Image (cartoon, rainbow, N blue to C red):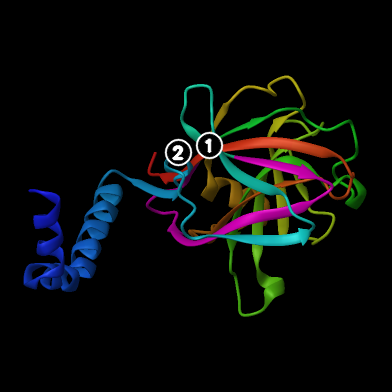
Amino acid sequence: MRRENLCQELTGTRGRSFVRLLPAILLLLHTRLVLADQTAGIQPVGNFSSTDLQGWEPEYFVAETRYRFTPDKSGVPVLCAESRGAASGLVRQIPVDLRKTPYLNWSWRVDAAFLRHDEKTKQGDDYPARVYVVLDDGPFFWQTKALNYVWAVRAPVDSLWISPYISGNVKLIAVESGNARTGHWRHEKRNVIKDLKLAFGKVITRIDAVAIMTDTDNTGSSARACYGDIFFSAN
């Protein structure tokens, strides 16, 4: 169809009908995509390889960590974070039924871990990369629970500890640790039901949000990390 004919189609009667139908078409396409994901046992959370930040909102604590899309060596976009004495993250409110998709999958790369500070103190509570799962566990803000998967400094992999800032309701698990694997992409998969039970002593079958953060405010240092796609899966 020639360009002028296409313009007539979109601005004429057919065009007005198309505009009226567009929301329904988009809804149908979205529904089909969601159903396809559910059938495949996949729930997308962060489609960073498509440069998609829809649904992600910034959360500021101290100054601003910069998040921007950058192609990796293969040319696939990833979300990279740069922090200089800052602490801010990105949060996506998204309900996840862990009975259907209990496994959290993501990839990340850290350029370098920090110097050997005590990460279990307030003064050392910085991480080059974090991925949170968050549960709204009651009507009051102090009932919110969070499990924080971190690239640790010296804590052993799979070790668990309580946040020095919010006693009891925020727990951290070291998924990677130290500098041995920095500079390389690491692909992670965690059974969130199992990790939440370990952290909070009870079976939790849903979460309400996912967040990422690269923070350096307590140590006054700098960090750069990149995050690949994040999704939940059935197995």
Q: Is residue 138 left or right of residue 162?
A: left
The quarter holding residue 50 reads top left
Which residue ends up furthest to the front in the rendered image? 4
* C-alpha distance separating marks 2 and 1: 6 Å
Q: Is residue 108 visible?
A: yes
Q: Is residue 170 left or right of residue 196?
A: right
Mark 2 closeness class: few <14, some 14–19, many ≥20 residues within 10 Å: some
Q: Is residue 51 left or right of residue 176?
A: left
- x then y, percent, for residue 43: 39, 50
Q: Is residue 56 left or right of residue 158?
A: left
Say the numbered circle drawn on residue 78. 1
- x then y, percent, for residue 49: 45, 38
Q: Which residue is mark 2?
A: 49
> What secondary structure predominates along the stretch shown in magenta?
strand
Label 1: state its secondary structure. strand
Q: Which residues are magenta?
A: 80-104
Which residue ends up furthest to the top in the rendered image? 180
The residue closer to the viewer here, 152 or 61, is 61
State if disc 1 and disc 2 touch (CB < 8 Å): yes
**Membership of 172 in magenta stretch:** no
User: Which residue is located at x 54 percent, y 39 percent?
Assistant: 190
The quarter holding residue 210 reads bottom right
Label 2: state its secondary structure. helix
- x then y, percent, for residue 65: 72, 49
**Membership of 85 in magenta stretch:** yes
User: Which residue is located at x 23 percent, y 69 percent?
Assistant: 23
Q: Amino acid at mark 1?
A: Val
The residue closer to the viewer here, 100 or 10, is 10
Q: Earlier in the sequence, mark 2 or mark 1?
A: 2
Q: Which quadrant does the C terminus fall into?
A: top left
| Total marks placed | 2
Mark 1 closeness class: few <14, some 14–19, many ≥20 residues within 10 Å: many
